[in-house]
Amino acid sequence: MPELPEVEVLKRGLNELIVNQTVKAISSINSPRSLIGSLSDINRFVVGAKITEINRRGKMIIINLSSGYCLVVHLKMTGQLVYRSDDEQKNFGAGHPTNSLVGQLPDRSSRVVIVLEKGTLFFNDQRKFGWIRLIHKNLLEDIKLYRTMGPEPLEGIPKNQFSANLSRRANLKIKPALLDQTVIAGVGNIYADESLWMAQIHPSTRVKNVPAASRGLLLDSIVDSMNTSINFGGSTDRNYVNAKGQGGSYLKFAKVFRREGLLCPRCGSEIIKIKLAGRGTHFCPVCQKEEQSS
């Protein structure tokens, strides 16, 4: 699943490429549930409207329109947004890493096609879990996921607020707590593993046993790991193309994620992988001491 840094890179790229373009047409292909909104509303509030800004909330992209409405996009597990410009030097794709990012479109995974003045934006989704929803910008809180999502890590969360949000999950293990989108927005498997390594916290430690100082360090680590990923163009390691035609490269610099059997760059011990809350979890057993049961 694309994680917050990938969606942030996507937001920034689309802001460079499609803002101020008018929507000429929009249609769904082989998946009516991928485009949520009545046909009359889509024709009235999308077609002919100008794209004014691209925003992000957690892992959702928000395409704002001059009509006062917006298209909210959630990529879910296998979604992509791919922009094919009339100028091939400005092609752009991000999301789940498949050949659809670089192949001819539309293809079998294309669900929604948005025709713009200077190119076409494709929403591709192999498993059809993702969606685009038309909604008025003043009604975004009506989307439950939008309403219940925790604070944005890249917008300066106070450490005491982060700690308080964690405390609502006091008996939960720290990694599953980080994956809870009501605690903090946008942290997925990669950045949970990386930030816990940076803060030297074992992923199985109960939240109630993580001291305040370590929680503050953990928040700093989340922000640092995400900003590092954004600077390298996201964590997708194949078929990713950003707004400048460059591939994301963060995973080449990851410290523990997908590095099981390799040596910890901090202490030289072997990184191991376990299953925790149904997710593959990578950590250093020496740097990140396991909580001892009393």
Image: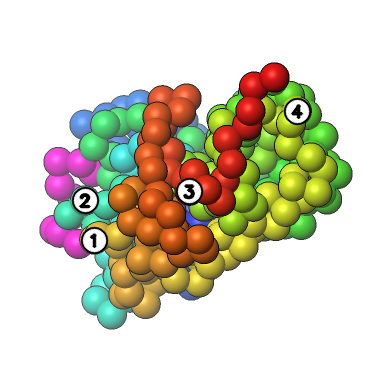
Q: Which of the two labelled residues, at mark 2 and mark 3, occupies the earlier sequence position?
A: 2
Q: Residues within 10 Å of mark 4 (few under 14, many from 20)?
A: some
Q: How is the image coloured?
A: rainbow
Circle 4 is placed at which residue position? 208
Amino acid type at circle 1 is Asn
In what element is the residue under mark 3?
loop
Q: Label 4 vs label 3: CA separation? A: 21 Å
Chief SS of the magenta region: loop
Using residue 242 as the reference point, say whether residue 202 is left or right of it.
right
Q: Label 2 vs label 1: CA separation? A: 6 Å
Contact (Cβ within 8 Å) of mark 2 with mark 1: yes
Instruction: Name the quadrant containing residue 145.
Output: top right
Classify 279 as above or below 26: above
Q: Which of the two labelled residues, at mark 3 and mark 1, occupies the earlier sequence position?
A: 1
Q: Nearer the viewer, residue 222 or 39?
A: 222
Classify 272 as above or below 114: above
Amino acid type at circle 4 is Lys
Rendered image: mark on residue 16: none
Q: Label 4 vs label 2: CA separation? A: 40 Å
Q: Which of the two labelled residues, at mark 4 and mark 1, occupies the earlier sequence position?
A: 4
Circle 3 is placed at which residue position? 284
- Nearer the observer, disc 4 or disc 1? 4
Image x and y of residue 223, in percent:
64, 58
Classify 238 as above or below 162: below
Residue in the image at 15% along x and 47% along y: 107
Q: Quadrant of the C terminus?
A: top right
Q: Label 4 vs label 1: CA separation? A: 41 Å
Contact (Cβ within 8 Å) of mark 4 with mark 3: no
Rendered image: mark on residue 98: 2
Q: Label 2 vs label 3: CA separation? A: 31 Å
Amino acid type at circle 3 is Cys
Q: Residues within 10 Å of mark 2 (few under 14, many from 20)?
A: some
